[in-house]
Amino acid sequence: MRRLQNYLKLSVTSGSAVEIASDDLAVISGDALITQEQFMVMIAELNGKYDEASVFSIPADFSDVSEEEWYAPFVWYAFYQGWTAGKGDGTFGVGSSVSLKTVANFVLESEHYTVVSYENIIEQLKLMGVEVDVADENAITFAEYSEVNNKLKSVIRYTEKEDALIQIMKLLGVEEEASKFLKQLHIM
């Protein structure tokens, strides 16, 4: 049964979250750190799977996730979708903060962008032209998540437009001339 009175629904576009618990609304500040379990809710919502995840009932074997917790169905769903494997020690990591690497990895993969190396993902961001300013790379706030998400998606969409332009130039047979022009603009 859907847990309507005790779950965390996130509004990631505004960089804030609204906690719904026993019909009381409380706004969590953009400065609040995102926990692992909150991030699983965000991932489900961003993938359009919130409703499906909220009623998921096949437990994953994490010793720190009780079926009584509001986030349990989201964590289990994320596990079976391959979005998380937990900490590798039989625990999920309830209450621990989400890192910049985790956020960047998720955003890049959700946009079907190749992650070269999880360990070197911050360097990959810099190579993509995405400078990220966060207080602590190991603990991201809702506001920082929103900024990282927007910057990455902006760069990815720009790259997709550039790729589309190159394909059109190939079709028109003007690839060489256009390539010179794009290089002058420092696009290529």
Image (spheres, rainbow, N blue to C red):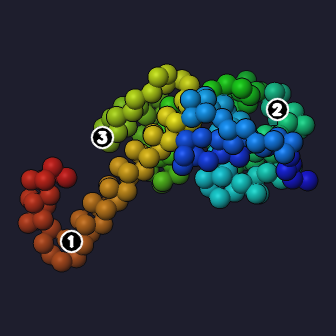
Say which label, 1 or 2, has the lower sequence index: 2
**Residue at image mark 3:** 129
The quadrant where residue 84 appears: top right
The quadrant where residue 15 appears: top right
Q: Give the residue drawn at x 25%, y 66%.
A: 165
Total of numbered circles in the picture?
3
Per the rendering, the mark at residue 65 is 2
Say which label, 3 or 2, has the lower sequence index: 2
How dense is the environment of label 3, judged by Cα within 10 Å: few (below 14), some, or many (20 and up)? few
Q: Give the residue drawn at x 77%, y 57%.
A: 52
Is 42 left or right of 119, judged from the image as shown? right
C-alpha distance separating marks 3 and 2: 38 Å
Rendering coords of residue 82 (x, y %): 66, 46
Rendering coords of residue 19 (x, y %): 74, 40
**Residue at image mark 1:** 170
**Secondary structure of the residue carrying numbered label 1:** helix
Is 68 left or right of 32, judged from the image as shown? right
- The amino acid marked with disc number 1 is Lys
- The amino acid marked with disc number 3 is Gly
Compared with residue 48, is residue 42 higher up or lower down, i.e. above or below? Answer: above
Whether tag 1 and tag 3 are in contact, CB under 8 A, the answer is no
- The amino acid marked with disc number 2 is Val
Is 87 left or right of 136, judged from the image as shown? right
Q: Which of 20 and 71 is in front in this view?
A: 20
Compared with residue 159, is residue 116 higher up or lower down, i.e. above or below? Answer: above
**Secondary structure of the residue carrying numbered label 3:** loop
Q: Which of 70 and 170 is in front in this view?
A: 70
Q: Give the residue drawn at x 62%, y 55%.
A: 47
